[in-house]
Image (cartoon, grey):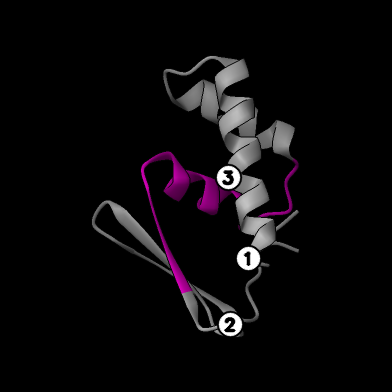
Amino acid sequence: MKLRTDDVSVRTLGTETIVLSLRTSQYFMVRGIGTRLLELLAADVEVADLVRSVVAEYEVDEATAARDIGTFVENLHAVELLH
């Protein structure tokens, strides 16, 4: 899966990242690990890759990371921000 780039604009301002869907005119704001996940989703990655990266970079166990990342990815799919 990969973050859409053809009709999505992503800008980081300080500690917040704003994602704008040009197709739906909806915008979303993420912070912290969410910003890092969007950076990782710029490449074609699998959820397991995201989990490994987050566990290595942050103080979080694998089960918690997998659960939270799964929810984050589901939400991005629901608003059609991922390919």
Q: Is residue 42 above or below residue 33?
A: below
Residue 23 placement: quadrant: bottom right
Residue placed under numbered mark 1 in the picture: 79
Mark 3 surroundings: few (<14), some (14-19) or many (≥20) residues within 10 A: some
Question: How far apart, in angstroms, are the residues tagged by discs 2 and 3?
Answer: 19 Å
Q: Earlier in the sequence, mark 2 or mark 3?
A: 2
Crowding at mark 1 (Cα within 10 Å: few <14, some 14-19, many 20+): few
> Disc 1 residue type?
Val
Q: Residue 11: x and y, percent?
A: 39, 68
Q: What is the x, y in percent for residue 57?
A: 46, 26
Mark 2 — residue? 24
Where's residue 59, x and y in %?
A: 42, 18
Question: Which residue is drawn at the image coordinates 68% and 67% (left, top)?
Answer: 80
> Is residue 34 rendered magenta in the image?
yes
The residue stretch that appears in magenta: 27-46
Q: CA distance from mark 2 to mark 1?
A: 9 Å
Residue 42 badge: none
Please state the total of marks drawn on the protein image: 3
Circle 3 sits on which residue? 72
